Image (tube, rainbow, N blue to C red):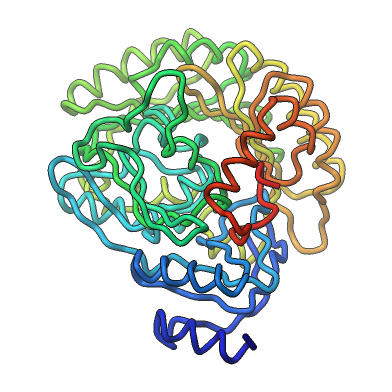
Amino acid sequence: MDGAAVHAALAALVGDAHVLPSPALTDSTGRDVGRPRWVVQPGSTAEVVALVQLCRERRIVIVPVGSRTAYWSPLRLDNSVAVDVSRLHRLEVANGVVRAGAGWPVRLLDQALRRGGAHLPLHPDAFGDTQLGSLVATACTSGIGMGSGSWGQILTGVEWVSGAGTAMWTGAADRSGVAPFMREGRPELTSLLLGSEGGLGIVTELAFRRRPPPWRMRLSGQAPSVLPLFPLGAELAGVYDTFRVQRTSRGSGEWTVDVWVVSTFSAREAAERAVEVARRLRIAGVSVRAPEAETAAARTGRSPDYDERWNGPLNGLGDFLARASLRGVDVNAPWSAAEAVLHVLENLVAAQVAAGVSESRLAMYAAPDFVNFGVHATVLPGESWSDEDDTPTYDALLALPVIPYRVGRRWPRGSADALGSRDVLRALKSACDPDGILAPGVGPWS
């Protein structure tokens, strides 16, 4: 089938206005992620099913695309049909469960839920433009909200379309508000979708438990060293929403500490918890300022202090991309390995500064049973820091007990084989995408 005939077939499925020209696309790193032949915007799960079936019949590569806020280069769009899920914005709240389309930007979804007395429990330390489906595709376990759990704990179900063109819900209790069904010792498909980066299917809708917005108190301050803060990450589990410690190459040399203490019951309880957390932070050497209560306007999603939490480490996506590009390394590690990982990433920051990179931010996010580390470098026009420059860091991290949050194809090829999982992953890919048309070469499926 020639290009004109394919275009006509795509337009017949989703409407001509939703088959877009195909300029070269970039992500938040400024990398060229390829030029798709068509960018298609389906408006429903049924249209996604028809689209996949068409591409399967014609052997056309199909790649789901969100807001391209990633910094690990997961997309390869050349000569593909890029499926832009931004029109998938259905929203239903019933029986204690939220069902939301994968195309919702996380900030706008949170605002919509707050109007009805709920909120989005987790979102990444990225940008508020990031779409909801990306949190499944990337197994988001870093950044804001991580102290409340992970997406695997929040989800009750996922609707997705496989590479065979079949729509299905996984998670046996997507409307009951309880955790996904799991059989001890056996995989559960909702969990297997986490981190699949579009290689197994296209996420069209998510279900998670409805939660009222918590009352929050903010604690912030400075610390000369991060090491005394490590024990607090696990010990304070359950009383914080975010426990972030960061230092930038343009800062004072001290670490900035930012802790949001929460209560699901009352502002009074949040304030009482904040007093105790502040006391413990001071013992650990943090010069803590007086706790600040989240304003009523912020709690309902309508204020500058609410907006601040959705700008990520580098301000809003549009503002950032207008002036710079991003390079990042992100890993999860057990607390026992935190000091060793910190040493490796401090060396990376030093190398970036020596190379003339304008700003490099090293951040740590505490979770009860692990810690997330990220290095985010702001690269201005005329400056350079390439993927190859990160290689010594990856080599050093491979010697440690870490899990790469997402480094995509740049993680050494042998790592999956070392885990003994390559054959299992390939069998799963074959079952979900028998013709290999979904995001070929992505992540662990290559």
State whether residue 200 is above or below residue 415: below
| Relative image position of residue 145 (x, y in whole percent) | 40, 35
Q: Quadrant of the N terminus?
A: bottom right
Drawn side of residue 6 relative to residue 152, left or right: right
| Relative image position of residue 162 (x, y in whole percent) | 47, 55
Quarter-of-image position of residue 59: bottom right
- Front residue of 378 and 370: 370
Which residue is painted at 69% across and 39% down in the image?
329
| Relative image position of residue 190 (x, y in whole percent) | 41, 39
Name of the residue lying farthest toward the top: 283
- Front residue of 135 and 176: 176
| Relative image position of residue 43 (x, y in whole percent) | 35, 72
Residue 238 visible to the viewer: yes
State whether residue 36 is above or below residue 166: below
- Front residue of 16 and 229: 16
Residue 28 visible to the viewer: no
Which residue is painted at 45% across and 74% down in the image?
41
Drawn side of residue 193 relative to residue 417, left or right: left
Which residue is painted at 82% across and 51% down in the image?
386
Quarter-of-image position of residue 208: top left
Name of the residue lying farthest toward the left: 95
State whether residue 102 is above or below residue 189: below
